Image: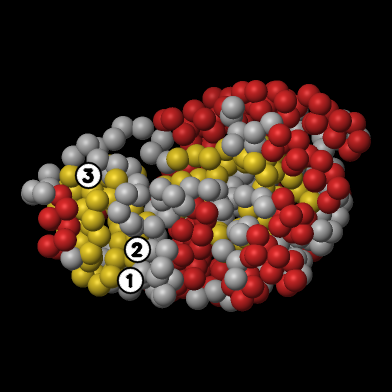
Amino acid sequence: MQSNHGTTVIANARNLLTMAENAQDHIGLVTNGFLGIRGEKIVAVGTEKAVYEALGGPPEQVIDASGMTVLPGFVDAHTHVVFGGTRVAEYAASMTPEGYERFKSSGALKGLEATIRMTREADRENLKAQAKKRILDMLEHGTTTVESKSGYGLDIATELKQLMVNRELDEELPVDIVSTFLGAHGWPPEMTKEDYLHHLLEEMMPRIAATGLAEFCDIWCDEGHFSREESELVLSKGRALGMEPKIHTGAYSYIGGGDLAAEMKMVSTEHLNYTPPKTLKKLAEAGVPGVLLPGTDFSVRHPMPVKGRDLIDAGMTVALGTNCCPGAWITSMQLVMTLICRNHGLTVEEALRAATLGSARAIRRDSDRGSLEVGKLADIQIWDTPHYEDVIYHLGENQVTMVFKRGLMVIDRKKTQE
């Protein structure tokens, strides 16, 4: 990624949302705020005088943010953004019981099995082109860091193909992509679960780990998927191979995945719909963030929408993900915040923090992003609104006017519209 080694001041922001660690209001609101950038990093935040003194001279450019809102770039903590094809016919049919019954009786592949086939059949360049379009749309909506899981191949060749696409797009796009190996998303139709687990543990995981393409290892722990015991086996193996554990847990039942996450002090727990309050307390005490996916609950009309307020009350760090995937094709974190506030009990301030600093913690990137603080990366978005609450009020409207990635302006929608 190209870097801007000059200096920039963002001036006169109506609302500067720092998301600082110690912010009592969750968002670290500074009114009429200034921010100074040198190269990739933030060097000062606060008053005009403090920012100009920190820079030690006139900046090379000044961005007038009068009447606007400035905040960190979003961190999308849970996606499956690299996948082949579309399941639009299945999704459209699911809008009514009658339509879905007709779709099922048609004999067409559906769900994970359909996406596995389409992802296996797509060559790397085609898969990359599809994912690139989705990631650039995320950037247009203010997302500057994306976690991206594999899991739509369930064979060595396709899992490697997905992870290679992650690396190539990370190198080519002004978005940081963090890779997670999700070989335990399920098991392929051509193998039994037992045979696949053996293959996963003895062949696939060592091969994936040797490439260095995945930082994290994930599994789906739920009824009809993998048990707590199987999850511990897989994630312990991943940790031994250098891939730290994350877990899909409690999405459609609760079989102990959250308790395992607390015991292993995992990177994150994700979904959490059926996770009991006592387990949420354990996760909070263990410092394990919870990644909530309100877009998925909306897309599938989930019978038990996740209770976001329960995580807040338990003291957990809350993170957000779009879960961009064939079953929940969402690229806008702004839409995710609308849903988490309306349907799951968070305030707009809590949602903003979850989509920035909380999500950065859920992928172990909070040391250098997720908040506007001195020494952190200048990953910044600017909204053309004086009311940060508009993000959940102007339904479906993209608030973003500018995005900076590592100090370089990469989106300027005003210029594009002129």
Q: Residue at x 21, y 53 (%)?
A: 36
Give the amino acid type for the residue marked by disc 3 in the picture.
Arg
Query: For this rendering, which residue is in front, 408 or 191?
Result: 408
Give the amino acid type for the residue marked by disc 2 in the picture.
Thr
Q: Calculate the distance from the C-alpha at mark 2 to the C-alpha at mark 3.
A: 17 Å
Q: Residue at x 55, y 48 (%)?
A: 363
> Which element type, helix, strand or loop, lies under badge 3?
strand
Q: Which residue is mark 3?
A: 38
Query: Does 417 appear above or below 397?
Result: above
Question: Of callouts 2 and 3, which one flags the residue occurring earlier in the amino acid sequence?
Answer: 2
> Which element type, helix, strand or loop, lies under badge 2?
loop
Q: Which residue is mark 1?
A: 29
Furthest toward the left, the residue is 58
Whether residue 162 appears in this view of the structure is: yes
Q: Where residue 43 sits in the image (x, y, percent)? A: 24, 51
Query: For this rendering, which residue is in front, 410 or 309?
Result: 309
Whether residue 400 appears in this view of the structure is: no
Q: Is residue 138 left or right of residue 216?
A: left
Q: Is residue 284 left or right of residue 276?
A: left
Query: For this rendering, which residue is in front, 105 or 233?
Result: 233
